[in-house]
Every structure is written in C-alpha cells, then in structure tokens.
Amino acid sequence: MIYSRITGLGFYVPETVVTNHDLEKYMDTSDEWIRERSGIETRRFFTEGKDTVSKMGARAAEVAMERAGVTPQEIDFIIFATLSPDYNFPGSGVLLQRELPFRNIGALDVRTQCTGFIYGLSIADQFIKSGMYKNVLVVGSEIQSNIFEKSNRNRDFAVLFGDGAGAAVVQATQDENRRILSTHLFSEGQYAEDLMLEHPGSNLQDRLGQELFDEGKHLPYMKGRMVFKHAVTRFPEAIQAALDANNLTKDDIAVMVPHQANLRISEAVREKMGLREDQVYNNIQRYGNTTAATIPIALAELYEADRLKEGDLICLAAFGSGFTWASCLLRW
Ligand code: UT7
C-alpha cells in the first residue's frame, strides 16, 4: 500500500508586529475588547514591495522542503490554498512555481478559505495514494491586513485577521504507522453569504462601480455570532467523524490543532470534546487569524518546539467561509 506523510513543515510571517493598541489609532476598539472576544494580542502585517502571498508561501516552502530533505526539482505538484491571491487570475500556485526552481509541474489553487490547508492535504493524500505523485507541496498563505479599511466600518472583523504563510511537504510512504490516516471534508453552501467578500465579483455588469465602494461591498462581510455558533458545532462533528472512521477516541489525540479563528471558539471546542488544555495548540494570540495559513504555521511551530513525537496522533480541524469544515488525522 502507498500512503502519504508530512515530512517537512515551514512557516513565514512578515516582520511588522501590530498590537491591539496600534489598531486603536484607526478605529474605536480596545486591547481589552479584542483580547476578551478573541484572545488576540498581536498580528503581523505585510511589507509592500517585499511580501506577496506567493513570495511568503515560497519562503515557508523553502523551509519545509529543506526539513523534508527534498529539492524544488523533486516536487511533483503544488497545492496553494489562499483567499487572498496575488491576482484575481492566474492563481498564486503558478506564481510560487516561478519563485523557486521547480520543474513545469502542475499548480492548483484551493479556494476554501479557512479549511484550505486541510482540503489541500486531502488532495495531496489522494494524488499520492493513487500513485500519480510522490512529493507534493501544500501551502497556505494570506495577506489580509489590506482587505479591511482601517476604520470603524468593519472593526468587528478587521481586528481578527493577520498575514502569514505555512507549508508542508507531503511524501509517499509505505510505513502504515506514520502517515495521514484520513481527511473529512464538508460544505454547506446555503451559508455562503454569511461570511464573504462580494466584490469585485462576476455577477454584475459593472464590476467596479463607485456605489459598490460606497456600500462597502468590497469589504469582507461576516455574521459574527452566526459563524461562531456554527463553528462550535461543526468543529466537534468533523473531529468526531475522523475519530470514528479510525476507531480512535479523543484520549488518543496527542495534539489537536484547530484552525485559529478565535481563542473562544478553540476553547469551546476543546471543552465540548472533553480535551485537556495540553492536547490543544493555539497561537492566535500572536498571529491573529491567518485563514489558510493558521494550521501549517501552528504545525511548523510545534515541530520547531519538538512537540511532534514519532507515533503521536495529530488532529487538524477547521471551519470557515462557505461554510466549509474539515478534519485530518495523522500519525506523526
Ligand atoms: O475564520 C473565519 C471565521 N470567523 C470566525 O470564526 C469569527 C466568529 N465570530 C466571532 O469570533 C465573534 O462573533 C466576534 C469576535 C467577531 C465578535 O464577538 P461578539 O461577542 O459576537 O461581539 P458582537 O459582534 O456581538 O459585538 C458586541 C459589541 C457591539 O456593540 P453593542 O451593539 O453591544 O453596543 C459591537 O458594535 O462590540 C462592538 N464591537 C466592537 N467593539 C470594540 C464590534 N467590533 C468591535 C471592536 N472593538 N473591534
């Protein structure tokens, strides 16, 4: 049997650290409100002219490939998850392809927002198990600090997000004890408009009309409380589906890495699942929500802290815009 395994992890975050107090200069908010509602203390903002979504992805990928002991020449396929691509088209995958000395391999952008990295891992897993590819690069990268106006107009949302990138090398293996065990992917499109960025979209004749800007249709929109409620239900469902499919229980989990949407969501999920604090890893305090990048950044940090031990059961789970939700279980 051929299986797939994560063999290298890396991350890159821009150098500019932005505190909650820094945001107080632009909108009516407070360090206290942001910490209390989300757990966030700082986030990173990109540097124009230096950081782009694809370049940040490339920096994370370089580290992941070095740790995996593979060169760009050996990578067979690129999967790039982002909601903030460099361009409307082409995708950021091809921009990453030209950034490093890869061969003329396929490059696929994944557009499932917060679940993008797990969807990407699932695609990598299927390509590897089918025998088509041996070495797949999965990247999650976002620049979100410029999606928002630095004003009161979407302050509930703007304070939550940050910029960053993470990457994983997924390789073929025959070792059934160290591998991706399963991925579970879900969606419920009826809630698409409850967490979205509408324009410039393709459904209007005038994609860039002034009234769209006046109405704020170029800004992300979120029904925060609704998203929160769905998240605390869907996260545990996805995790339980993964455990059931593998005849495992929550006590078998060494580390759970939830998508970093809000510390209160992670805490609620942990409590609902009956997991101990030491079983769940959070870093939203430092980076905010970096959407497709939260999980690979967290995994790379765990790796660097030597907290991923051979044979450990690692659980990844995410929920977000779409709505989409997903989980992945793997044996490190
Ligand atoms: O990965 C993407 C998925 N996104 C999420 O998972 C986010 C899910 N939702 C949430 O995390 C929370 O709903 C938020 C953190 C976005 C908001 O927390 P909340 O407890 O639901 O607050 P709220 O939106 O109900 O607002 C409470 C109050 C309001 O004032 P009033 O009406 O009570 O006077 C808001 O106007 O807080 C006010 N408010 C703010 N105050 C200071 C909203 N944004 C801010 C702000 N600073 N940035």
Image (tube, grey):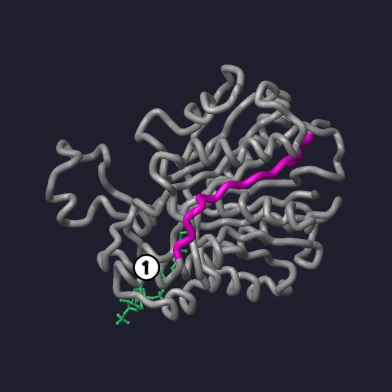
Q: Is residue 271 above or below residue 90?
A: below
Q: Which residues are magenta?
A: 3-18
Where is mark 1, residue-wise? 23
Residue at 80%, 49% (x, y): give it: 332
State which image quarter holds ligand 1.
Answer: bottom left
- The overriding secondary structure of the stretch rendered in magenta is strand
Q: Is residue 8 visible?
A: yes
> Can residue 289 be found in the magenta stretch?
no
Going by the numbered disc 1, the residue's amino acid type is Leu
For mark 1, give the secondary structure: helix
Q: Identify the image quadrant of residue 29.
A: bottom left
Residue at 37%, 64% (x, y): give it: 157
For the residue pair 330 and 309, the one nearer the viewer reads as 309
For the residue pair 240 and 94, the one nearer the viewer reads as 94
Query: Residue 57, how many percent across, how many down?
Result: 54, 39
Q: Is residue 49 above or below residue 300?
A: above
Q: Is residue 244 visible?
A: no
Query: Residue 55, how many percent across, how many down?
Result: 50, 36
Q: Identify the image quadrant of residue 272.
A: bottom right
Tell whether 266 sits left or right of 299: left
Residue at 79%, 55% (x, y): give it: 308
Query: Residue 63, how many percent across, how many down?
Result: 67, 40
Where's the N terminus, which quadrant? top right
Extreme top residue here? 104
Asked if the beta carbon under badge 1 is closer than 8 A to the nearest atom of ligand 1, the reply is yes
